[in-house]
């Protein structure tokens, strides 16, 4: 026991700068990720602010019934899963393609400038991006409708046409978030042993064959880990994204209303935190099952690509 504690103190002392850097994130996770766990109990209570968590009345599964008995419950669940799966698939494909493309560029300064440009939207808030999208798709003065008019095409009332918004939101998500995934994949490519490419060149492999037989297979563990981590959030709609872009536009709810925006509206109108927590527990349990289930399948097929 003493040796173990001594080893821990030596590790902390030798890498104190790294641990100090990680301390804010660790404290944030501990406070908001672990100290708040007892509040999950209010999903099974009729929560009373005066009585608190331990004094409120227990109502069992009644709060879950509020969500599952709703006529929109399965629609918002489907919308949430569909949007998140599309986000994961297309963001991964775009990030992989861009990482391979930048790795093949000969001009380093052009590559760095372009990478910085692609990464920049990641630091913008969805509120700002919501206004950018509005400037593109506004019916009367939007850039898209102005461009359609040049070609003699009738303008489209985008904000009353729900069939277009899945594609628009996927495009917006790629534009904003693909930069950070690109950095990760480029770092993974940089870590590939250069002698593998030299051996392939000696054997007569062209660039496409090297990408197909060396780069892509060696990137698969990174792709698998990032996809599994993203899969844990597949039941969580991007509330800030949806609400900043769609707001309370009921005409678009049929295709883009997700669980988080639905619960927010219900909480705002009903004001019952227990019902909101019940939906949060439902999202967490499904996400937990998905991550462990898919990781188990991946581990059976290829242990090197599994998360744990």
Image: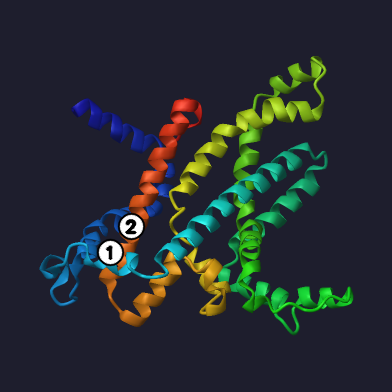
Image quadrant where one finds the C terminus: top left
Q: Nearer the viewer, residue 21 or 182?
A: 182
Image quadrant where one finds the N terminus: top left
- Give neighbour class at mark 2: few <14, some 14-19, many 20+ (Cα, 10 Å): some
Residue at figure coordinates x 81%, y 78% from the top left: 154
In the rendered view, would you say 174 is above or below 111?
below
Labelled pair 1, 2 in contact (Cβ < 8 Å) = yes
Residue at figure coordinates x 55%, y 67% from the top left: 255
Image quadrant in which you'd find residue 108: top right
In the rendered view, would you say 303 is above or below 104?
above
- Residue 180 position, x and y percent, is 60, 51
Q: Nearer the viewer, residue 206 or 190?
A: 206
Q: With 226 as the anchor, is 68 left or right in this view?
A: left
- Residue 42 position, x and y percent, is 22, 65
> SS for tag 2?
helix
Residue at figure coordinates x 44%, y 29% from the top left: 299
Residue wearing tag 1? 64
- Give neighbour class at mark 1: few <14, some 14-19, many 20+ (Cα, 10 Å): some
Residue ranking furthest to the top: 203
- Residue 102 position, x and y percent, is 74, 42
> SS for tag 1?
helix
* Nearest to N terminus: mark 1 or mark 2: 1
Q: Can residue 28 be seen by looking at this rendering?
A: no
Q: With 260 as the anchor, is 175 left or right in this view?
A: right
Image quadrant in which you'd find residue 32: bottom left
Residue wearing tag 2? 282
Q: Nearer the viewer, residue 82 or 237?
A: 82
Residue ranking furthest to the right: 151
Q: Nearer the viewer, residue 85 or 163?
A: 163
In the rendered view, would you say 90 is above or below 215?
below
């Amino acid at each position: 026991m003493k040796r173990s504690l001594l080893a821990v103190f030596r590790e902390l002392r030798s890498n104190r700068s790294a641990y100090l850097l990680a301390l804010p994130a660790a404290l944030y996770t501990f406070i908001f990720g672990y100290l708040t766990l007892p509040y999950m109990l209010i999903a099974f209570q009729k929560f009373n602010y005066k009585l608190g968590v331990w004094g409120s009345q227990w109502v069992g599964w009644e709060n879950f019934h509020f969500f599952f008995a709703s006529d929109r419950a399965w629609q918002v669940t489907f919308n949430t899963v569909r949007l998140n799966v599309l986000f994961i698939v297309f963001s991964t494909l775009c990030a992989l393609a861009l990482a391979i493309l930048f790795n093949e560029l000969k001009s380093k300064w052009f590559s760095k400038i372009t990478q910085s440009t692609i990464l920049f939207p990641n630091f913008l808030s969805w509120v700002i991006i919501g206004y950018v999208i509005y400037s593109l798709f506004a019916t009367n003065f939007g850039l898209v409708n102005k461009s359609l008019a040049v070609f003699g095409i009738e303008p489209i009332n985008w904000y009353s046409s729900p069939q277009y918004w899945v594609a628009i939101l996927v495009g917006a998500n790629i534009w904003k978030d693909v930069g950070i995934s690109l950095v990760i994949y480029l770092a993974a490519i940089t870590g590939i042993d250069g002698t593998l490419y030299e051996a392939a060149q000696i054997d007569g492999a062209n660039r496409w064959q090297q990408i197909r037989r060396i780069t892509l297979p060696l990137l698969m563990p990174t792709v698998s880990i990032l996809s599994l981590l993203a899969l844990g959030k597949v039941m969580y709609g991007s509330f800030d994204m949806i609400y900043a872009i769609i707001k309370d536009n009921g005409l678009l709810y049929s295709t883009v209303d997700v669980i988080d925006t639905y619960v927010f509206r219900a909480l705002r109108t009903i004001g019952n935190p227990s019902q909101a927590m019940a939906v949060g527990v439902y999202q967490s349990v499904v996400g937990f099952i998905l991550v462990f289930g898919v990781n188990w399948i991946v581990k059976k097929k290829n242990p090197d690509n599994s998360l744990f």
